[in-house]
Amino acid sequence: MNVTVFGSGYVGLVTAACLAEVGNHVLCVDVDPDKIATLKAGHCPFYEPGIESLLTRNAAANRLDFTTDAATGVAHGEIIFIAVGTPPQEDGSADLQYVLAVARTIGTHMSGYRVVCTKSTVPVGTSAKVRKALQEKLAERGADLPFDVVSNPEFLKEGAAVEDFMRPDRIIVGTDGPRPLERMRALYAPFNRNHDRVMAMDVESAELTKYAANAMLATRISFMNELALLAEKVGADIESVRRGIGSDPRIGFQFLYAGCGYGGSCFPKDVKALVKTGHEHEQTLQVLTAVEAANDRQKHLLFERITAYLGDLRGKTVAIWGLAFKPNTDDMREAPSRVLMEAIWAAGGKVRAFDPVAMETTRKLYGERPDFQLVDAPEAACEDADVLAIVTEWAVFRSPDFAAIKKLLRQPAIFDGRNLYDPAVVAAAGFHYQSIGRGAKA
Ligand code: NAD
């Protein structure tokens, strides 16, 4: 099939590359000329395991191309994906301006039947808005052309995005008729060989499913984070509690880790947007309001603990391991490290940080500043630093040389936002070690 994907970000590019890999001819359209130039030169504009080789292989086989020319994009694809950003607005609602801009572009240029498929995460009711925006453009042109709008939310995880797309748990397709559903089933058939993963439903249910999934995962994390705070007060170990409850198949082990808060481009914004959708329909979502508040508080925890230990941060330096919002990505959107670093700077302290892949993104975010140094190894972050904070659970941090770190730090203290170590082992190595939900062992 000929497929066009508007938006060459994490979701758009992974979608495009994986659809090309199974034999489709895919054209990616983006408004950012630098991004398109980078892609045309054979590079991926962000870090994602496995994506670059997929992009180069399929581009070389003429199954994948990149352009800024929207008209060419609309002419190319019988199925057109909208995979542009839906960032949060001031009031928490999803900003649909990019999605609706693409809908209008399609209406401006289309000349025959198209399936317009929304892959961006959008609130319930957006498909109707996409349909209206497109229809208005057609009407302006005096054109009467058939099209269908489909909701096909994406569930990939950054860091494992290619694998998730190639082997999805489910493929949610929201349609209001058999014709677009049949086209979507044909498109996804190669990803669907071992059993039928397509779940067909109405458009509104598909839109809500995406938010419900992210909101549920965020809820599990905030639940564990609150319980971790209680565990500290009552002398329990949240890791034992996690194992104890995760073994119940009704609960399961996934997404039960206590830590220094969730970040990323999806959970924070999707929880906010769902709460806002609730307000708009006079249906208060109390659980999710609390989930968000608990997470905001949790993101400040490391800073509170570090200041409680160090006192005045002026003249002090905090070493930070891990900047990305989670391992295996360079994405810094809503990363807990940002809350920590910005709080340290506001208190007059300095930061020396290391991340295996997110340092370039961090540099672009904060630029050069006298109270910030990025270094090229975990140990180097500890040199001339007072204490160490661990924010992202990269594999490289899992088995450090505690003796070497102790020599480098001015004060032997580790504030672990990801519960990477056995508290008894770190305490035996002579550290003040504070993790989440397991008490302080000095
Ligand atoms: P992103 O910010 O990485 O990429 C969006 C791209 O769209 C940018 O390159 C931007 O230049 C481009 N764009 C904006 N307007 C455009 C237009 N009119 N025409 C063509 N391109 C345009 O975003 P992302 O992380 O890929 O997320 C995209 C959507 O998918 C969001 O709604 C997000 O919530 C959802 N989503 C993201 C993930 C994830 O893990 N990142 C997972 C599932 C769903």
Image (cartoon, rainbow, N blue to C red):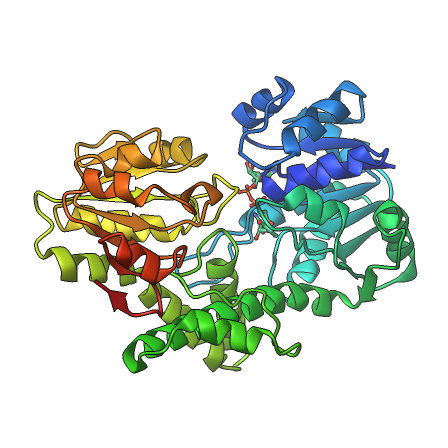
Q: Residue at x 15, y 59 (%)?
A: 309
Q: Viewer-proximal residue, 410 or 358? A: 410
User: Is 240 placed left or right of 71 in the picture?
Assistant: left
> Height in image: 259 above or below 391?
below
Image: 129 above or below 40: below
Q: What residue appears at the point 75 percent right and 27 percent down from the top-left corner?
A: 64
**In this picture, residue 136 sits left or right of residue 94:** right
Give the camera-side residue of 267 and 183: 267
Give percent across and percent down for residue 390. 34, 50
Taking the spot 86% from the left edge, 40% from the top edge, the residue there is: 112
Residue 363 in the image: state x and y as whole percent.
Answer: 34, 32
Q: Is residue 134 above or below residue 258?
A: above
Residue 209 showing in the rendered view: yes
**Residue 410 drawn at (x, y percent):** 14, 43
**What is the x, y in percent for residue 99?**
61, 48
Q: Quadrant of ligand 1?
A: top right
Asked whether residue 102 is in view, the answer is: no
Q: Nearer the viewer, residue 43 or 433?
A: 433
Q: Which quadrant of the figure contains the N terminus?
A: top right
- Farthest residue, direction front: 428
Q: Quadrant of residue 55?
A: top right
Could you tell me which quadrant the C terminus lies in? Answer: bottom left
Count up the numbered dots.
0
Left or right of 64, for residue 314: left
| Residue located 63% across and 27% down the image | 68
In the figure, 246 relative to 107: above or below?
below
